[in-house]
C-alpha cells in the first residue's frame, strides 16, 4: 500500500487585522483559506500595531514588550517542532527590518529554511540609502532566503539584486467573496463616486478631492463618498477646509471607517471607484479587488502591480499620479456613459471570479510553495 508524502511543515508569520490595511487583510485571507490544510501550518502572530497611526517604525515600550514576547513564542515553537520552511513578511525600512532580524535570528539558529513573503516595496532603495553596517545585515539576511514571494511581476525587482531570478515568485492576491448581496434595485438617482482606503494623503484621497470642482463644473447630479480612517489629523483639517472653501458640502460625504456588510453595501451602492494612489510602498491595491468584485469601473494609477490587475480601458482607467485633471476627465467619461460603465462592470465581475477569489489565491500560493520546495529538493539532490 502506497503512503502519501507527509505534508510540509510551515511556520507562517502573520500580522492580522486590526489595523485594516492590505497586508493584514491578505494575511487573514491566507489563514482562512485552503492553504492552511494543504500544508501542516503553525501560525506565529507578530502584530506590533493596534491602529493605523502605530504602523511603521514608531517606538513604544509596548512594542518592545511584544518583541520579547514573540521571541519566546518563536523559540518555543522551534524547540518543540521541526519546520521545513518559515514564511516571513520581511519589511523594507530600518527599524521594522531590525526587528525582523531579531526574530529571524531565532529561525536561522534552528536551521529552518526561510521564504520571504514581501508585501512592501523598494528594497533596493532601502539598501542603497542604508549605512554600511545595515547594508551588511540586509545582504546577510536577504541572501539567506531559500526564495522570495512578491505580489506582482512588477515587484520582482526588489529581490533581483540579492537572489537568482528563478527563486523569486509572483503571487497575485485574492479576497474573500462578499457575504451580502447587492440590492435588487439602486434607489439613488445620482452618480456615486467612492474612495475607500485609509485617508492618507499619499493614497490619493486629496487628488480626488481636488478633482471634484472640475467634475461639478460639468455635472451636478453626483456625489463623492470618502470612507476610511484618518492617519493624520492635519490632513483631516486640510480636507475639511478645502471642502468649505470650494463650497463642496453638497457633494462630499465623509463616512469614516467601514467594515463588513456596511463596506460591501457601500461598494454596491456606488457607480465608480477612484483610488489615485501614489503611496511610496504601494504594492497591489487590495481595495481595487473589492471594487472589482462589486463590478465598479476603477480609476487608479500605474503604481507597482496595479496595472497587472486594472487594464486601462478594459475594466478601468490608469491615470498619472497626482493629476486631479486626469482623474476628473475619467470620472466625467464614466459618469456620462452608462454603456461604458456596464461594459467595465461585466469585465470586472468576470475577471474577479476567474482570478481573484480567496480560492484562486490559495491555489496560487499552494502551487508556489510546492514549486519552491521542488526547486530546493532538485538543487540539493
Image: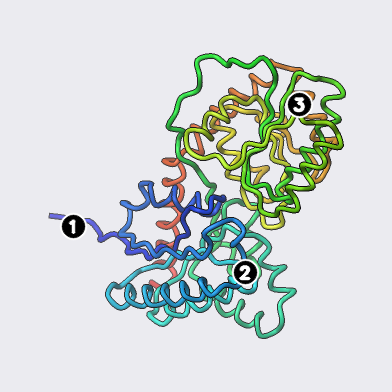
Q: Residue at x 30, y 59 (%)?
A: 40
Residue 226's spot in the image, x, y percent? 67, 37
Tell me if 304 is positioned left or right of 44 in this view: right
Q: Secondary structure at mark 2?
A: loop
Residue 148 in the figure: left or right of residue 251: left
Query: Residue at the spot x=65%, y=63% of the render?
Result: 158
Labels 3 & 2 near each other (Cβ < 8 A): no
Q: Which residue is mark 1?
A: 3
- Which residue is at a point 44% across and 41% down the rendered structure image? 358
Mark 3, Cα crowd under 10 Å, few <14 / some 14-19 / many 20+, is: few
Mark toward the start of the polypeptide (3 vs 2) = 2
Left/right placement of residue 271 relative to residue 22 reads right
* Cβ–Cβ under 8 Å for marks 1 and 2: no
Q: Within 10 angstroms of label 1, few (less than 14), some, or many (20 or more) residues?
A: few
Q: Secondary structure at mark 3?
A: loop
Depth-wise, is mark 1 or mark 3 nearer the camera? 3
For label 3, the residue is: 250
Q: Which mark is residue 57?
A: 2
Rounded to the nearest whole Å, what is the CA distance between mark 1 and mark 2? 48 Å
Q: CA distance from mark 1 to mark 3?
A: 68 Å
The picture places residue 115, in percent across and down from the top left corner, at: 47, 66
Amino acid at each position: 500500500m502506497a503512503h502519501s508524502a507527509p505534508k510540509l511543515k510551515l511556520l507562517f508569520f502573520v500580522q492580522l487585522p486590526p489595523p485594516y490595511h492590505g497586508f493584514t487583510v491578505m494575511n487573514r485571507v491566507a489563514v482562512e483559506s485552503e492553504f492552511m490544510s494543504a500544508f501542516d501550518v503553525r501560525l506565529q502572530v507578530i502584530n506590533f500595531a493596534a491602529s493605523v497611526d502605530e504602523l511603521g517604525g514608531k517606538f513604544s515600550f509596548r512594542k518592545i514588550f511584544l518583541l520579547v514576547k514573540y521571541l519566546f513564542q518563536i523559540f518555543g515553537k522551534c524547540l518543540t517542532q521541526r519546520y521545513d520552511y518559515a514564511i516571513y513578511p520581511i519589511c523594507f525600512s530600518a527599524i521594522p527590518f531590525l526587528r525582523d532580524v531579531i526574530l529571524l535570528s531565532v529561525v536561522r539558529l534552528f536551521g529552518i529554511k526561510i521564504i520571504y513573503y514581501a508585501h512592501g516595496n523598494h528594497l533596493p532603495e532601502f539598501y542603497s540609502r542604508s549605512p554600511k553596517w545595515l547594508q551588511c545585515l540586509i545582504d546577510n539576511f536577504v541572501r539567506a532566503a531559500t526564495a522570495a514571494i512578491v505580489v506582482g511581476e512588477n515587484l520582482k525587482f526588489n529581490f533581483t539584486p540579492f537572489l537568482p531570478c528563478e527563486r523569486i515568485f509572483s503571487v497575485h492576491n485574492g479576497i474573500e467573496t462578499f457575504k451580502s448581496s447587492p440590492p435588487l434595485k439602486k434607489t439613488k438617482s445620482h452618480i456615486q463616486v467612492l474612495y475607500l482606503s485609509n485617508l492618507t494623503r499619499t493614497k490619493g484621497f486629496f487628488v480626488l478631492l481636488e478633482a471634484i470642482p472640475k467634475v461639478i463644473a460639468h455635472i451636478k447630479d453626483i456625489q463623492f463618498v470618502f470612507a476610511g480612517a484618518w492617519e493624520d489629523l492635519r490632513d483631516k483639517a486640510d480636507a475639511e477646509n478645502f471642502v468649505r472653501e470650494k463650497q463642496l458640502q453638497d457633494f462630499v460625504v465623509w463616512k469614516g471607517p467601514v467594515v463588513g456588510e456596511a463596506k460591501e453595501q457601500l461598494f454596491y451602492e456606488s457607480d465608480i471607484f477612484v483610488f489615485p494612489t501614489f503611496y511610496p510602498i504601494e504594492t497591489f491595491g487590495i481595495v481595487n479587488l473589492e471594487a472589482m468584485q462589486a463590478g465598479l469601473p476603477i480609476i487608479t494609477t500605474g503604481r507597482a502591480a496595479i496595472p497587472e490587475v486594472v487594464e486601462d480601458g478594459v475594466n478601468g482607467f490608469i491615470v498619472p499620479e497626482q493629476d486631479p485633471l486626469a482623474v476628473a476627465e475619467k470620472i466625467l467619461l464614466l459618469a456620462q456613459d452608462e454603456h461604458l460603465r456596464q461594459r467595465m462592470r461585466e469585465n470586472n465581475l468576470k475577471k474577479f471570479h476567474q482570478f481573484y477569489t480567496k480560492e484562486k489565491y490559495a491555489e496560487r500560493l499552494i502551487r508556489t510553495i510546492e514549486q519552491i520546495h521542488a526547486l530546493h529538493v532538485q538543487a540539493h539532490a
